[in-house]
Amino acid sequence: MALFSVSNEAELRLAFEAASVFGIQNTIVFEEDIVLTEGLEYTGEGKLTLQGNGAALIAGEEFQSYEGVGAGLDGFGVALITSRSSATFRAFDLELDGNEGRAQHGFELDVPADADGVIKTYFDGVEVTGFWDHGIHLDDQAGAAGGGGTTQGGKDDLTGANSDASLFVKIIDSEFALNGIYADRGSVSDNDGVRIDEGGNGYADVIIRDSEFVANGADGFELDETGRGFAGVDVDSSVFNDNGPFDLNDTDDGLDVDEAGRGRLEVSVRNSEINGNFDEGLDLDEAGKGSIFVEVVNTVANNNGNAKLNGLATDPGGTGIKLSEEDQGDIFAEFINSQANGNDDYGFRLEQFGGGEIDALFESVWALDNRNDVPGEGGRNGIRLESFATGDGEEPEVLNPVFAEFNTVVATGNGREGLRVDAEPFTAMFRGENIFDFVDFSSTTILV
Ligand SMILES: [Ca+2]
Ligand SMILES: [Ca+2]
Ligand SMILES: [Ca+2]
Ligand SMILES: [Ca+2]
């Protein structure tokens, strides 16, 4: 094991260079804050651990910028740390500071094309703020824009690879704030607090505990999984608030997970807040083979949407919790002791397309005062469930089953009825005291 203690840029750069050549285990220990003039690169085969001891790594006033790479990048800052290694990366008790947009990412993982197995990345006690692009970007999607990945063609000097590798990410006691909001230093649409792009073979599995994703230009957290493999995100005691105001033509979400191709989407959110984001609060999209499995417990998703931009957003709306499942597969959802109130569109919206069913439990749930007061839009429901044998937008629509249990649900004050269901058949169980009105677009409703 190689251990490096560093207290200035020259020592830190030497440590990265040495670690890239030697060692199975490399630990770099920060003795004090360090201001960087150039980005750091790691290309070694050994594990790399940054032990920050509370120090900050800061992009300097004249931090290195892209030159001659084109794609609208020239003149904008490079990433603070870039890894081109499939070895485990860990950062502890370290602040990464982009200095108001002078650096692109705090940490960029460009997955090598020949990577396989599981690449593990850990952030514990890490604060990431002030980057013009994603605060953190883990990139295993090929192509300048990625398969549904980032939108600024070629903005990373090397792009991810659609490698055979999977990504395992653990985020503990960390904060990601105020990234992607610096228009004159490179920020454009879709610059998130944390962005994980997984492509090709392999899955993405993310654990988040006691962390905050706040006031980033686009999504607070986004996972985009394509190709074979599932997308899994397990969240406890975390905050995803006030993200997504940057692009007025495409405002963004608190917590956004997209899964495409083979594989399921599995998300659990417990004891968390998803409030005040400028599009959806929690936004889950699954496509290709596979189902959505979601559990939301002791969590609030309130006041999401872009009406607070007073009409500046070109596509009004924003739902508290939105699930969309396309193609083969179903939605299995449990919402317990949770609320989605005051959102600009629906409180809860679940859509199943392409054949399958929705199986949902709402227990001790509030969906209050969700409305879309845009003239002519006519308001929204507290809870809307739609299940189709046909694809999204395909005519004529053919309905599929919904099974739903409502136990002590209040859905009042919404722009339209508290509950709307489009299903064939709709099988409903009512337990406890439920307070909502109901509009039924199902041809058969079975009360059990
Ligand atoms: Ca992969
Ligand atoms: Ca997949
Ligand atoms: Ca899928
Ligand atoms: Ca389906």
Image (spheres, rainbow, N blue to C red):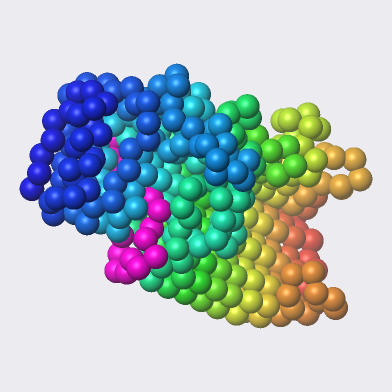
Residue 65 lies, with reference to residue 371, above or below; the image says above
- Seen at 77% across and 73% down, the residue is 442
Residue 45 drawn at (x, y percent): 22, 56
Q: Nearer the viewer, residue 310 or 184?
A: 184
Instruction: Residue lying at the far right in this picture: please name it.
Output: 376
* Quadrant in the picture for the C terminus: bottom right
Q: Nearer the viewer, residue 195 or 328?
A: 195
Instruction: Residue lying at the far front in this picture: please name it.
Output: 68
Task: Give the extent of the magenta segment.
Answer: 109-125
Q: Nearer the viewer, residue 50 or 317?
A: 50
Instruction: Residue lying at the far top in this picture: please name it.
Output: 61
Residue 394 appears in the picture as rendered: yes
In this image, 305 relative to 141: left or right?
right
- Seen at 56% across and 68% down, the residue is 260
Residue 31 drawn at (x, y percent): 17, 24
Q: Nearer the viewer, residue 289 or 299?
A: 289
Q: Please tell me in which quadrant of the rendered image residue 310 appears.
A: top right
Residue 160 drawn at (x, y percent): 45, 58
Q: Is residue 43 magenta?
A: no
In this image, 6 relative to 344: left or right?
left
